[in-house]
Image (cartoon, grey):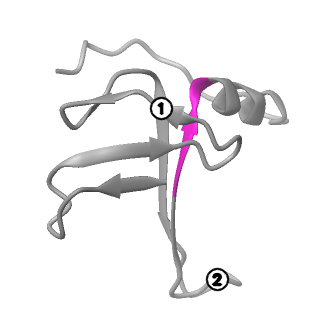
Amino acid sequence: MRKYSDEEKMHLEQVTCNACGRSLQVENGIIREGCYHGDSAFGYFSRRDGVKHHFDLCEDCYDKMIEKFKVPVEESETMELL
């Protein structure tokens, strides 16, 4: 869950893991640790048609979530994101 200090959502103030409730480290509007941001808009054939979900997970909770998958996540190398 993200909290911004302004209406335009330009300055990130706080990020809380939706699973464990821990506040992630944020400095000057930048998340300073691993964070998974889930963002999904459900479509016509879904039970949640027309609903959007947004959530954040700390790395520990993300790891716990993907450990439960029957099919492992696809993993690939990426260039450093600045």
Sequence-wise, the earlier of marks 2 and 1 is 1
Q: Nearer the viewer, mark 2 or mark 1?
A: 1
Residue 49 appears at what percent x and percent y? 58, 87
Query: Where 79 falls versus 15 (above or below)?
Result: above
User: Residue 20 or 36: which is nearer the viewer?
Assistant: 20
Residue visible at 85% across and 35% down in the picture: 70
Residue visible at 14% across and 67% down in the picture: 8
User: Residue 54 or 33: which is nearer the viewer?
Assistant: 33
Query: Where 18 falls versus 77 (above or below)?
Result: below
SS for dot 2: loop
Residue 72 is one of the magenta-drawn residues: no
Which residue lies under the disc numbered 2?
A: 48
The type of residue carrying mark 2 is: Arg
SS for dot 1: strand
User: Residue 43 or 11: which is nearer the viewer?
Assistant: 11
The type of residue carrying mark 1 is: Leu
Residue 41 appears at what percent x and percent y? 47, 72
Task: Tell me which segment is drawn in magenta.
Answer: 55-59
Residue 3, label in figure: none
Alpha carbons under labels 2 and 1: distance apart:
29 Å
Q: Quadrant of residue 81?
A: top left
Residue 57 appears at what percent x and percent y? 58, 39
Query: Where 4 falls versus 79 (above or below)?
Result: below
Residue visible at 47% across and 32% down in the picture: 24
Secondary structure mostly seen in the magenta stretch: strand
| Residue 80 shown left or right of residue 60 in the figure | left
Circle 2 packing at 10 Å, graded few (<14), some (14-19), many (20+), is few
Quarter holding the C terminus?
A: top left
Residue 24, label in figure: 1
